[in-house]
Amino acid sequence: MSSPYRIGFGYDIHQLVIGRKLVLGGVNIPFHKGLKGHSDADCLTHALADAILGAAGLSDIGCYFPNTEEKYKGICSQVILKKAVEEAKAHGYNLVNADITVIAESPKIASFINEIKATLSITLGIGNSEIGIKATTNEKLGDIGCEEAIATHAVCLLTSEVDN
């Protein structure tokens, strides 16, 4: 018998580079560097989309939006996240909640968390109170600690439509 609840985990990391906007959770964050990637490189949104797809037992975002296809160059990651939610629904699952941890030495994102939650709430179709976002550093260790990258961990809970 299959459980009506499914947990998903997602992880993403992108290199910080000069000449790109920094987008996290669909929000432009003022910073002198941005994340390198084929899309807008929003590692928060990518991790969350993968968590949702994984919870539904589906493939990762690269299968839906290959970085080898020019038509996806610069795509807004909120489009990717919306597709993940749609795919989960098509397979009988609704998002209950999400919890996200951003790992970055800088910039500090605490003052942007409410705006990120509001943006994600619209894309996900759930309330702000169903989204947890935390930020931490890597204690000056590794690529993240040297301000060369930002990473994100995300978990989510899905439930089957019959239980809603």
Image: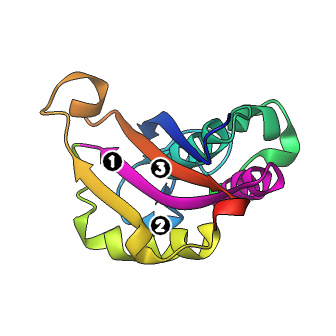
Residue 98 in picture, x, y percent from top left: 46, 56
> Residue at coordinates 53% horizontally, 61% vertically from top-left?
96
- Give, as a single range, the part of the protein colored magenta: 78-104
Which residue in the protein does label 3 denote? Answer: 44
Q: Secondary structure at mark 3?
A: helix
Instruction: Please give the label number shown on residue 28.
Output: 2
**Which is closer to the viewer, label 2 or label 1?**
1
Spatial CA span between label 2 and label 1: 18 Å
Lower position in the chain sequence, tag 1 or tag 3:
3
Instruction: Please give the label number shown on residue 48.
Output: none
Q: Are marks 1 and 3 in contact (CB under 8 Å)?
A: no
Lower position in the chain sequence, tag 2 or tag 1:
2
Residue 28 in picture, x, y percent from top left: 47, 67
Magenta highlight on residue 124: no
Q: Is residue 52 left or right of residue 88?
A: left
Which residue in the protein does label 1 denote? Answer: 101
Give the residue at the far front of this rendering.
1
Q: Amino acid at mark 3?
A: Leu
Q: Is residue 121 left or right of residue 33?
A: right
Q: Are marks 3 and 2 in contact (CB under 8 Å)?
A: no
